[in-house]
């Protein structure tokens, strides 16, 4: 009678040891590097996220389709009438492919300090979601092969805060 709980416990421990406590694949850490070809200040990585103020930031690792990029975004300060964030796929060979969010188009009008949840799904073509709503803005096809992911901000002196960045 006492062996049954011990066998169940041993079986559960073995299952956790082999499969891990959380199901699914484990995400690899995201490593970023600044792209030093643009105006503005370099990006800053702190415990509460990334701060972008002009210069672009690019992943060290390469990704390939299908991949999703998701993060919380807040405009802290804008210099100029239009502000935006662009996700650019930079392949080993060939031209970079930019995926933009046009904040001037309905249903969103960018407001400083307000958080937005952005998701870029790159599955043969790019799909953008803001706060769970699909944006139909004629997004481009993803490049063949592997590519770096790059985040660009505009105008170059606007300041942005990105948190909870996930690449899956």
Image: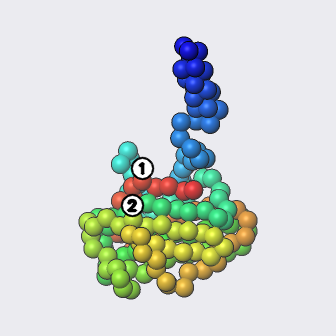
Estimate the x, y position of residue 25 in percent, counting from the top left: 61, 47
SS type, badge 2? strand
Report the front residue among 39 and 143: 143
Residue drawn at x 42%, y 50% is: 45
Q: How is the image coloured?
A: rainbow
The image quarter containing residue 108 is: bottom left
Q: Residues within 10 Å of mark 2 (few under 14, many from 20)?
A: some
Taking 51 as reference, is 19 left or right? right
Query: Of marks 1 and 2, which one's residue comes earlier in the chain?
Result: 1
Question: What is the x, y in percent for residue 48?
Answer: 35, 48
Tell me the quarter of the image containing the C terminus.
bottom right
Measure how far apart labels 1 and 2 are at the Cα level.
15 Å
- Residue 34 appears in the figure: no
Q: How packed is label 1: few (under 14 Cα within 10 Å), some, or many (20 or more)? A: few
Q: Nearer the viewer, residue 72 or 132?
A: 132
Residue under label 2:
72
Q: Which residue ends up furthest to the top in the rendered image?
A: 2
The kind of secondary structure element at disc 1 is strand
Q: Is residue 82 above or below residue 59?
A: below
| Left or right of 115 on screen, residue 59 | right
**Would you identify the image quadrant in which residue 66 lies?**
bottom right
Instruction: Check disc 1 and report the residue beneath it.
Output: 45
Whether residues under marks 1 and 2 lie with C-beta atoms below 8 angstroms apart, the answer is: no
């Amino acid at each position: 009678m006492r062996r049954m709980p011990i066998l169940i416990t041993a079986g559960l421990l073995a299952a956790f040891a082999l499969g891990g406590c959380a199901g699914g694949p484990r995400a690899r850490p995201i490593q970023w590097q600044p792209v030093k070809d643009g105006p503005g200040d370099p990006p800053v990585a702190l415990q509460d996220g990334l701060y972008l103020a002009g210069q672009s930031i690019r992943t060290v690792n390469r990704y390939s389709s299908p991949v999703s990029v998701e993060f919380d975004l807040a405009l802290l300060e804008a210099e100029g009438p239009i502000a935006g964030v662009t996700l650019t796929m930079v392949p080993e060979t060939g031209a970079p492919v930019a995926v933009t969010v046009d904040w001037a188009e309905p249903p969103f009008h960018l407001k400083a300090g307000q958080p937005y949840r952005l998701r870029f799904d790159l599955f043969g073509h790019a799909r953008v979601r803001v706060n769970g709503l699909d944006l139909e803005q004629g997004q481009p096809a993803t490049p063949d092969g592997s590519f770096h992911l790059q985040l660009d901000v505009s105008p170059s002196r606007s300041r942005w805060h990105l948190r909870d960045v996930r690449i899956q």
